[in-house]
Amino acid sequence: MMLRCSVLLTLLAALCQAQSPPKEKVAGPKPDIPVLYQSIVITASPVQPSLERRNEEVFRQTLFSRDDQLFHLLAAGIDAGQHEGGGKSIEVRRFGFNLDHGGVNGGLKVLVDNVQQNQGTQGHGQGYLGSLKSLSPELVQEVSIVNGPFSAEYGDFSGLGVVHIRLRESLPDVWTARIQGGSFNAQRGFLAFSPELQDAESFIAYEGSRTDGPFLKPLGYRRDNVTGNYTRRLSERRSVGLKWNGGRNDFYSSGQLPLDLVNAGRLDRFASLDPGDGGRVRAGTAGLYYRADTAGGGVWKLDGFLSRSLFDLYSNFTFFLNDPVNGDGIQQHDSRLQEGANLQYTQPHSWAGASGLFTAGGNFHANQINVGMYPRINRTPLGITLRAHASVTNGAGYVQEVFSLLNNRLQVGGGLRYDLFSFDLDDRADPDGSMVRRQGNIQPKANIAFTPSRSVPATLYFNYGRGISSLDARGIVEAPRGDLLATTDFYQLGTSHQFGRYAFTTDLFWIDRSNELVYIPDDGSLEFAGPSRAYGFEAKASIGITRRLALEGGITKVLNSYYRGTNPREYIERAPHFAANGAITVAGWHGWSGSLRLRAINHYRLDPLDPTIRAAGHTVVDFSASRRIRRGVEFNIAIDNLTDRAYFETQNYLESRLQNALPTERIHGTPGYPISVMVGLTFRFRGKQ
């Protein structure tokens, strides 16, 4: 069945491009030269295996009730699931690796307007992506997905790719409002004011969201975000912008339940075993952006940001395994101040008959963090397990050059990046654990694209990149002489083809990781899993059937994923080897627009040696539609899990014990939401010229 689904999915297309005009057939590839926008984000050509785009229509037409739903629309082989029922950051899986919350096993780097969202040395996990809770989907302009560490612009956590989200600088209408409500007491509102200004673009927006979820212990999910932008054009060639964002998020969690008890009927699928599980987040970020175009076509971009966040997560993974009286509940605390700056210069040029683009830049990112771990009952701390102050600084510089030869039939590029990290740990619970360490690493990049003939719409690609992922500062204590940085060597060989409204790409990938240095925040240990390897293939297709009907789909198949040098061989666990997505989209049909989307993963192993310990896969179908009622008023509807599939978003194998029971090694899971209906109205007033 899964194989038949994978064949069908390769024929699906254009969730993201459905409302764009059909692309013209091109004889050869476009040069791999970035397109320059008025904002800080630089985005490259999407017609190649290493890059994908999602435009604003994907997010504008969908009714969201939780922050994790944004990842369901990215596709690109990214499988993401809730870890504790709706509030905590998602668990990310890609290319046969489990990235936990985004920062281990290579990492998936996520940025919003050039501000890194992955939080290193985080109270709950390295590279934690919880700051995405303050992102309002209606404000997304475009998302660029780099399918590997192929760009010198990006450093830490980019080993398995980059997701760069670019927000709007203004909205098309002066006033935009959305109200929505639906299943499980879900309510959400969005209000934005974007005035027409001379020589400036601006908006200010508020988003509020509430839901209890399907759980027996109500989720109590509450999110409030305020986002703004003001961009001033100083002249035809210069502009400066100020962006700000603040948010709060409170929630309770179901936790991960023992599935043997769920299957035996002793626990409801939406039950909870610890009444204190949940969390609260407070965060604010302000950024200043400057851009200047030179007379020779060059572009200077400079930005800086300041961010402050408070994070408390209350979890219980093993219930009463370690403390039969009080239970194993823990509070994980993270209080953080961040500063960052980015400088980039791009210059198109020609040399010996070839055109090219030179890029150079630098990044600086500093974190001052107060992290702690405390045993608890409900939400009352009982003592101190860990308390430390950490200062983590990352400075980097990079250069990259792309040449276009043979009348744009051949593109050759290369880049080099160097990152230097400084880790300063002041352990307040154990002074012997305090230390200072520094380490740097060079990351080469290379790419080639060749079109053999202009009469045949086929382009061959080879991409290589080395990415890095940093170790949690607390892990230095466990391995004082070990490496602080793990590397990911990513090789990709692919093709792209375009025949009028039909386009598809294929690629083979090979990934070598230097060492799986994985910090386990839930018990304070560091796991040395050794070097690893994964390889497989991808296929993605899009079909513009008519101007109003389009299909899109893709599959990622990992053929093998294992630890090198093990005998007997140990396999990488906790990540599917098959991920698929598909969509059929209708735009402007008798006033209706909408999409039917599918996402699927196969079952996957949860133990490196025993293949019988496996997590179940799932296939989930979501539906969304909108219709214009009258000028400035739009009706929206979204139905998640349309077929009411009973599934678990994440599953893990570990030992746990219920009160007055024996310890048991078992699979634990977080239930996916059942069928959920959301309806809303969107109002737009005073459209701009």
Image (tube, rainbow, N blue to C red):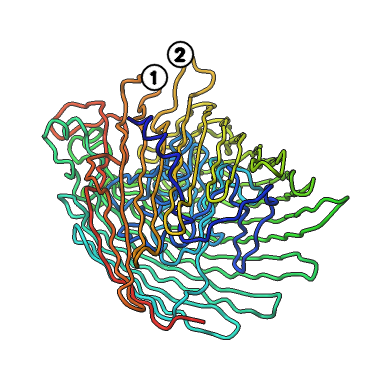
Q: Secondary structure at mark 2?
A: loop
Q: Residue at x 39, y 48 (%)?
A: 583
Disc 2: CA contacts within 10 A as few (<14), some (14-19) or many (>=20): few
Instruction: Identify whether 489 is placed above or below 388.
Output: above
Residue 80, quarter of the rendered image? top left
Q: Residue at x 75, y 54 (%)?
A: 357
In depth, the one of 434 and 673 nearer the eye is 673
Q: Amino acid at mark 1?
A: Leu
In depth, the one of 66 and 596 nearer the eye is 596
Residue located beneath label 1 in the image: 609
Residue located beneath label 2 in the image: 568
Disc 1: CA contacts within 10 A as few (<14), some (14-19) or many (>=20): some
Q: Secondary structure at mark 1?
A: loop
- Give me the disc on residue 445: none
Instruction: Identify whether 103 is placed above or below 602.
Output: below
Residue lying furthest top: 568
Residue lying furthest bottom: 198
Q: Residue at x 40, y 33 (%)?
A: 576
* Between discs 1 and 2, the one toward the N terminus: 2
Residue 43, quarter of the rendered image? bottom right
Marks 1 and 2, how far apart at CA: 8 Å
Q: Is residue 524 left or right of residue 494?
A: left
Instruction: Identify whether 567 is placed above or below 259.
Output: above
